[in-house]
């Protein structure tokens, strides 16, 4: 199983989505084609299981670090993205998405308890202070709201690392722009300590429910990426770590 085989496996296209992207894109056809191929073409299959299992297509979702809008475009009515990159914001708005432009680590703009779910995809590995950002977006969730975090992960042993390099040709967590790295266990710990109850960690591949259920227990610690889903719960810091120990910007 090679990277080319995986691309072929995920090669089915959503023609309505493709037409929307190409007809509304503010960029040239060639540049739009590159954006489509890299970010949008395979996203419906990547999202298929979590979308159905958790009904994200019917929920009001805040997409943090929404990039080109490749996930946001599939979420329910009232959903919104947050992105700092000028070009990605311009593209997202052109294709009809609601995106605010600001740095989530600099300021906080979201109304409390206003979203059913918060979605982070390939964001937490870039964040200077993951705990502080998670605490902020904890506030944006309605009571019992869901948190989805997808990050590249460190496979749990050297054999799994070797397999990922052989079959995929890369280790995502080692990208030079990443300043944090997680295993499944450290990701779950980080999420838990920010005020969330872990529901599951899943690779959501392949996009076939029964097959995913069969292989996920064996592969979730071997894969080079993971999605962890958690539910908002009441949160207070331990008495052994008083609030006075937090920096003022948390």
Image (cartoon, rainbow, N blue to C red):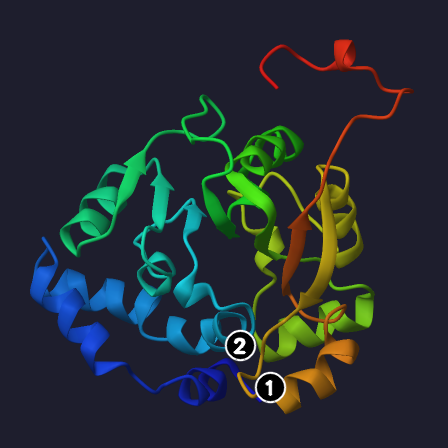
Indicate the position of residue 169 as horizontal and vertical percent values. 56, 72
Q: Mark 2 and mark 1 in contact (Cβ < 8 Å)? A: yes
Residue at 42 percent of width and 44 percent of height: 65
The circle drawn on residue 209 is 1
Q: Mark 1 or 2 closer to N-term?
A: 2
Indicate the position of residue 72 as horizontal and vertical percent values. 35, 57
Q: Is residue 177 left or right of residue 222?
A: left
Indicate the position of residue 111 as horizontal and vertical percent values. 43, 31
Residue at 35 percent of width and 40 percent of height: 83
Could you say which quadrant of the image residue 142 lies in?
Answer: top right
Residue at 39 percent of width and 75 percent of height: 44
Badge 2 element = helix
- Quickly name the residue at label 2: 49
The tally of labels here is: 2
Badge 1 element = helix
Q: Dot 2, crowdedness within 10 Å: few (<14), some or many (≥20)?
A: some
Q: Is residue 53 above or below residue 12?
A: above
């Amino acid at each position: 199983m090679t990277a080319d085989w995986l691309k072929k496996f995920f090669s089915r296209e959503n023609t309505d989505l493709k037409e929307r992207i190409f007809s509304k894109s503010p960029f040239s056809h060639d540049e739009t084609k590159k954006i489509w191929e890299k970010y949008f073409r395979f996203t419906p299959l990547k999202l298929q299981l979590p979308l159905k299992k958790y009904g994200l297509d019917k929920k009001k979702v805040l997409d943090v670090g929404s990039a080109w809008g490749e996930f946001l475009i599939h979420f329910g009515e009232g959903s919104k993205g947050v992105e700092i990159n000028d070009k990605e914001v311009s593209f997202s708005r052109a294709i009809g998405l609601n995106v605010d432009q600001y740095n989530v680590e600099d300021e906080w703009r979201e109304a409390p308890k206003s979203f059913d779910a918060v979605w982070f995809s390939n964001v937490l590995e870039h964040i200077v202070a993951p705990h502080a950002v998670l605490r902020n977006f904890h506030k944006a969730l309605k009571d019992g709201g869901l948190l989805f975090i997808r990050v590249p992960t460190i496979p749990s042993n050297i054999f799994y690392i070797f397999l990922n390099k052989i079959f995929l040709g890369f280790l995502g967590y080692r990208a030079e722009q990443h300043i944090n790295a997680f295993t499944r266990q450290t990701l779950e710990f980080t999420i838990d300590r920010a005020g969330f109850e872990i529901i599951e960690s899943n690779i959501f591949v392949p996009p076939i429910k029964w097959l995913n259920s069969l292989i996920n227990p064996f592969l979730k610690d071997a894969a080079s990426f993971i999605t962890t889903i958690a539910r908002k719960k009441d949160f207070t810091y331990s008495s052994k770590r008083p609030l006075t120990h937090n920096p003022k910007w948390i």
